[in-house]
Amino acid sequence: MYGLVNKAIQDMICKYHGENTWEIIKQKAELEDIDFFISMDAYSDDITYRLVEAACGVLDMQAHDVLKAFGEYWVTYTAEEGYGELLDSAGTNLPQFIENLDNLHARVGLSFTQLCPPSFDCEHTSEKSIELNYRSTRQGLAPMVIGLLHGLGKRFQTKVDVTQTSFREHGNAHDSFSIKYDDSQSYD
Ligand code: HEM
């Protein structure tokens, strides 16, 4: 994945657990040769998976929780790292933004030319609920999507409740999520 992703993982770990913990995680992931990640360079996916795995060991957390926290972090990280306008252009409320996720990544792909983006499609199952299908060339990132949806809920001051309803790891064709949202109440 692009260095931007690995940088965001580094940023999240440094912010919540400190620089020393980051150095330990980096060493455990056998990435001590990398001084820093370059946002616009494409790295092997293996590097990102190794970072997540090492973070689980050092922080005594499950991969699910690390990925979920990372997904939530990604929404504010990208907004602060120069992609705020891109996020703004994808929608002014949660359902609209979710509809535009593939357009958003298509726009990202104009500058990240080797991008291998996820794909989302959704169905509005009632006035305040959405069924979201997530497809990816990569395995195991569904918890990140759950975190991303919570991050978007915060962005739009919308309470979200996400339940995963189908699981690729259990043999389903793709991952699906049932999202209930309420923008009349603030997130917290
Ligand atoms: C402006 C904001 C965003 C930018 C710049 C961005 C960019 C990227 C980049 C560079 C990757 C790595 C893919 C690769 O290197 O091949 C990625 C992956 C991903 N993005 Fe986004 N993204 C943004 C917002 C979002 C949002 C809001 C979601 C919400 C669902 C999302 C969902 C994902 C997922 C799930 C992946 C993991 C890759 C996979 O599933 O295969 N992204 N994105």
Image (spheres, helix red, strand yellow):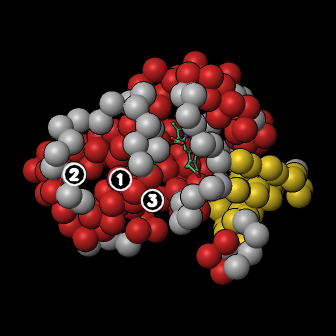
Ligand number 1: quarter of image: top right
Report if residue 108 is visible in the image: no
Where does label 2 land, which residue? 31
Q: CA distance from mark 2 to mark 3?
A: 19 Å
CB contact under 8 Å: marks 2 and 1: yes
N-terminal label among 2 and 3? 2
Circle 3 SS class? helix
Q: Residue at x 66, y 25 (%)?
A: 107
Report if residue 132 is visible in the image: yes
Where does label 3 land, which residue? 67
Name which quarter of the figure residue 85 lies in.
Answer: top right
Where does label 1 land, which residue? 47
Residue type at mark 1 is Ile
Residue 7 lies, in percent from the top left, at 33, 39
Q: Name the one closer to the observer, 42 or 102.
A: 42
N-terminal label among 1 and 3? 1
Residue type at mark 3 is Leu
